[in-house]
Amino acid sequence: MNLAFVNGRRYVTGAGTRPGGVAVRDGRIVAVGADTDVVAAAGTGAEIVDARGGLISPSFGDAHLHPAMGGLQLGQCHLDRCTSAEECLDTIAAFAAEHPGEAWILGGGWSMEHFPGGTPHRSLLDRVVSDRPVFLRNRDHHGAWVNSRALELADIGATTADPLDGRIERDPDGSPAGTLHEGAAHLVTKVAPPPTRQSLLQGLLRGQAHCLAQGITQWQDALLRVMGPGLDAMDVYLDALADDALQARVTGALWWDRDRDRDQIADLVARRGRARGHDDLFRADAVKIMLDGVAENFTASLSRPYRDRCGHETGNRGLGFIDRDLLKDIVATVDARGFQAHFHAIGDQAVTDALDAVAHARRANGDSGIRHHIAHLQIVRDEDVPRFGTLGVIANIQPLWARFEPQMTELTIPFLDPALADRQYPFLDLYDAGAVLAGGSDWPVSSANPLEGMHVAVNRTPEHSPPGTEPFIPRQRLPLVVAWDAYTRQVAYLNGREQRTGRLEPGYLADLVLLDRDPFLGPRHEIADTAVVGTWLGGQCVYRRG
């Protein structure tokens, strides 16, 4: 299909927007500029796409996404739209009544701020579902809420020890209260029914449709793990390819199992090999290494202790999931095997550990040129900021989290050392120091909409908030052009596709999004009001607003 986008504005990488259109022939951009020029370049019989004053941009990317998990959750008991504990309970009760044949009630998306201390009790679930086990992950997927039946089936009681990478919330008598943090949730998932290969494929396709509607055509899947005998999350991408159903350019990050040692390298190499031959749409050459938890449940790894409710220091600095010396060895090994390390690091100590590990790999292997990246970066030490540029480590940022909301104001800031609380999401510092910023969402943890992420990156206020809303650490606000590049060319760069997509230039693949307006021309507090009109992958329309 040949196309000519006219009567609009176009995005120019690194510069902003200007009037003009885009011509597409055989899946690639052949011209940009004046409408008359692009119509001529598109050729006779080309489809004319009237932008109606909207913006034509490279389609968006997401550097940290969980589409199969998000799509699977959409088909389960999902609580992400609930605004209170009671609404959560009503939704759970209704789902259970509508699905009497389900042996387990599975799902998630509940917000910690709806429950005292962010830790809902099992008795609340028992009140609405007592005949079947219930397992519901919270919004950030770093904890789970379970009922008494689930605890019973998992044999979790007062004498059950906390795992090394998690914590069981307990009543005063030591019995499990119903909230399981981090690795403690795995005590229940071991006995819960796993998804099937078919349900995961359905989840991936449902998640893909959701992303295409946001203008996203490329991403890094941040969690491809072996989920049980014969069930590898990577296989659903291969199934989608076999069915000619994958409509995105994807890099898979293979899960580093911290319960195993370096013998898993051979498995990672073999899994990467099974993905070979599909480089245009899918490859699996990244390794996901999770270093810590999250700040709101006190498992993010910090350089200074958490505070208690009275502001006094505790003995808790969070959890570091991998020994620092072992981490250096792991990263040097995956780097030598040609894998990109994709770190989860929330706390400043975890960020330091990741940077130290990459520095060790650079010393051990030389500069491999592999684009390692650290996701989330909630707290970053001043002295670590310039190391991103020096080491060539990409800052994989989730801008939507850099705002005042109850999870921040009630469950995070009061429990952090003030010096750490003031170092949260230092996007501008990183950019000014030469770091490459790549944008992501962590969907379904938070909205997949890149325009909402950009809105918060630029304003440091919640999306759709009115002028005058108090910004969160406003000195870290990004220019819109930097945020836009983060969600376009820099995701392509992170995934090694920057020579083929991420720009509106002749020769690049026609991976495009058409928006209903040019947010560069309007007030910055209206960025999130921008809507996607259509999405194209290689010149083929994969989403159009109804």
Image (spheres, rainbow, N blue to C red):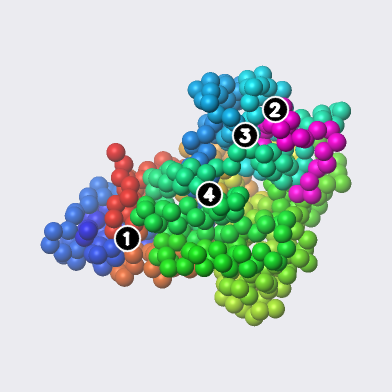
Q: Tag 1 or tag 2, which sits nearer the N-term?
A: 2
Alpha carbon separation for disc pair 4 and 3: 17 Å
The residue nearer to you, when weighing 306 against 46, is: 46
Q: Is residue 3 left or right of residue 213?
A: left
Q: Is residue 145 above or below residue 530?
A: above
Question: Which residue in the structure is indicated by mark 4?
Answer: 66
Q: Is residue 238 above or below residue 180?
A: below
Residue stretch in magenta: 143-165
Question: Which residue in the structure is indicated by mark 2?
Answer: 149
The residue nearer to you, when weighing 251 against 292, is: 251
Question: Which residue in the structure is indicated by mark 1?
Answer: 538
Q: Is residue 291 left or right of residue 374?
A: right
Q: Spot the residue most to the left.
A: 44
Image quadrant holding the N terminus, namely bottom left
Q: Give the residue type at disc 4.
A: His
Q: Tag 4 or tag 2, which sits nearer the N-term?
A: 4
Camera-side mark, 2 or 4: 2
Which residue is pictured at 66% across the width and 24% down the height?
125
Q: Tag 3 or tag 4, which sits nearer the N-term?
A: 4
Q: Tag 1 or tag 3, which sits nearer the N-term?
A: 3
- Would residue 405 be seen by someone viewing this image from the given angle? no
Alpha carbon separation for disc pair 3 and 1: 38 Å
Q: Give the residue type at disc 3.
A: Leu
Q: Tag 1 or tag 4, which sits nearer the N-term?
A: 4
Q: Tag 2 or tag 3, which sits nearer the N-term?
A: 3
Q: Is residue 385 above or below residue 225?
A: below
Q: Give the residue type at disc 2.
A: Arg
Question: How far from the left and from the top, in percent, is residue 446?
Answer: 55, 42
Q: Residues within 10 Å of mark 2 (few under 14, many from 20)?
A: many
Alpha carbon separation for disc pair 2 and 4: 29 Å
